[in-house]
Amino acid sequence: MPASTRALAGATPRTLEITERLFTRMINHLADAAQIIEQSGMRAYAPFVLIERAHLADVEGDDVSCGHRLKEAHGLFSEMGAPIRAAQVEGELGA
């Protein structure tokens, strides 16, 4: 059971509703950011959005999506010549 599910186990219906709306908004904002990055060609920001999307997938308990996004971010950091950032993401992959 994901930590988010355990944390909300005793929540009221109203709290669950608000949490779901906020979570959906975060997902939408990150999708908007990814689209802006793609359209503007500012690829240097793409791995940061991928990391945040991976964290949201982790909260949802989606290990496959989380791992995929972290691997993609790692690859982008490596391509950009950002070894410290790539190592940080590699650390998250190993955790």
Image (cartoon, grey):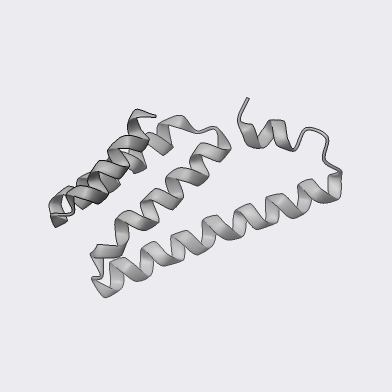
What residue lies at 35% left-to-right and 56% top-to-bottom?
A: 48
Q: Which residue lies furthest to the top in this view?
A: 1
Nearer the observer, 38 or 82:
82
Q: Quarter of the image containing the N terminus?
A: top right
Q: Position of residue 3 (x, y in %)?
A: 63, 32
Q: In this view, does 67 lie above or below 45?
A: above
Q: Where is residue 9 in the image (x, y as percent from the top left)?
A: 78, 32
Q: Which residue lies furthest to the bottom in this view?
A: 40
What residue lies at 53% left-to-right and 60% top-to-bottom?
A: 28
Say which quarter of the image contains residue 18: bottom right
What residue lies at 45% left-to-right and 60% top-to-bottom?
A: 31
Q: Is residue 73 above or below residue 8?
A: below
Q: Where is residue 58 in the image (x, y as percent from the top left)?
A: 50, 37
What residue lies at 28% left-to-right and 74% top-to-bottom?
A: 40
User: Does 9 sit left or right of 33 as displayed?
Assistant: right
Nearer the observer, 93 or 62:
93
Q: Quarter of the image containing the C terminus?
A: top left
User: Does 23 sit left or right of 78 as displayed?
Assistant: right
Say which quarter of the image contains residue 65: top left
Label tally: 0
Q: Can residue 17 be seen by looking at this rendering?
A: yes
User: Does 72 sit left or right of 67 as displayed?
Assistant: left
Q: Can residue 76 be seen by looking at this rendering?
A: no
